[in-house]
């Protein structure tokens, strides 16, 4: 991950705070990035040959590069995972708003 753990829960979710939809969009993109990181890690494990320059430091830098690449790909929303997650949660939030009388508590 590129962001410190303390910043993840530092701000309240916009739906809970009654604000816009930026938090849901960011969470959906973060989820897509996690899926893409796992996909990239699986592809790296399926290497076809020995890495003659391989070391633990190289592996660490590749993991960081893969994480950044996954975040960049998720931000472009080309895979559609974030869109589906966002749509699903919007439907659930809409149902909660209807049951609670107009606002999410």
Image (tube, grey):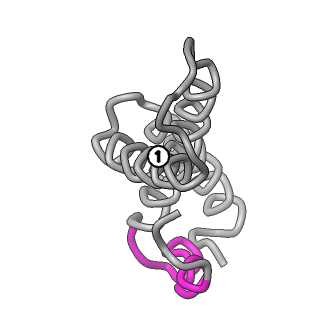
Q: Secondary structure at mark 1?
A: helix
Q: Residue at x 47, y 46 (%)?
A: 62
Residue 54, position in %: x, y?
53, 39
Q: Residue furthest top?
A: 48
Residue 85, position in %: x, y?
55, 41
Q: Quadrant of residue 100?
A: bottom right
Q: Residue at x 51, y 42 (%)?
A: 32
Q: Is residue 88 above or below residue 47?
A: below
Q: Nearer the viewer, residue 78 or 18?
A: 78
Q: Is residue 73 above or below residue 18?
A: above
Residue 64, position in %: x, y?
47, 55
Q: Classify residue 33 as left or right of residue 96.
A: left
- The total of numbered circles placed on residues is 1
Q: Residue furthest left?
A: 76
Q: Classify residue 82 as left or right of residue 35.
A: left
Number of other residues with Cα within 10 Å of mark 1, as a class: few under 14, some 14 to 19, many 20 or more: some
Q: Nearer the viewer, residue 65 or 27?
A: 65
Q: Residue at x 41, y 64 (%)?
A: 21
Magenta region, residue range: 6-20
State the predominant SS element of the stretch in magenta.
loop
Q: Residue at x 40, y 50 (%)?
A: 65
Q: Is residue 18 magenta?
A: yes
Q: Is residue 5 above or below residue 100?
A: below
Q: Quadrant of residue 25?
A: bottom left
Pointer 1: what residue? Answer: 62
Residue 31, position in %: x, y?
56, 49
Q: Is residue 101 above or below residue 42?
A: below
- In which quadrant will I find the C terminus? bottom right
Q: Nearer the viewer, residue 101 or 10?
A: 10
Q: Residue furthest front?
A: 52
Q: Is residue 5 magenta?
A: no
């Amino acid at each position: 991950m590129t962001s410190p753990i303390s910043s993840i829960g530092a701000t309240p979710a916009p739906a809970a705070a009654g604000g816009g939809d930026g938090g849901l969009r960011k969470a959906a993109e973060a989820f897509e990035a996690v899926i893409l990181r796992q996909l990239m890690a699986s592809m790296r494990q399926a290497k076809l040959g020995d890495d003659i320059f391989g070391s633990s430091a190289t592996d660490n830098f590749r993991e960081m590069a893969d994480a950044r690449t996954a975040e960049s790909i998720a931000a472009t929303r080309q895979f559609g995972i974030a869109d589906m997650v966002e749509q699903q949660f919007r439907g659930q939030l809409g149902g909660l708003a209807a049951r609670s009388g107009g606002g999410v508590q």
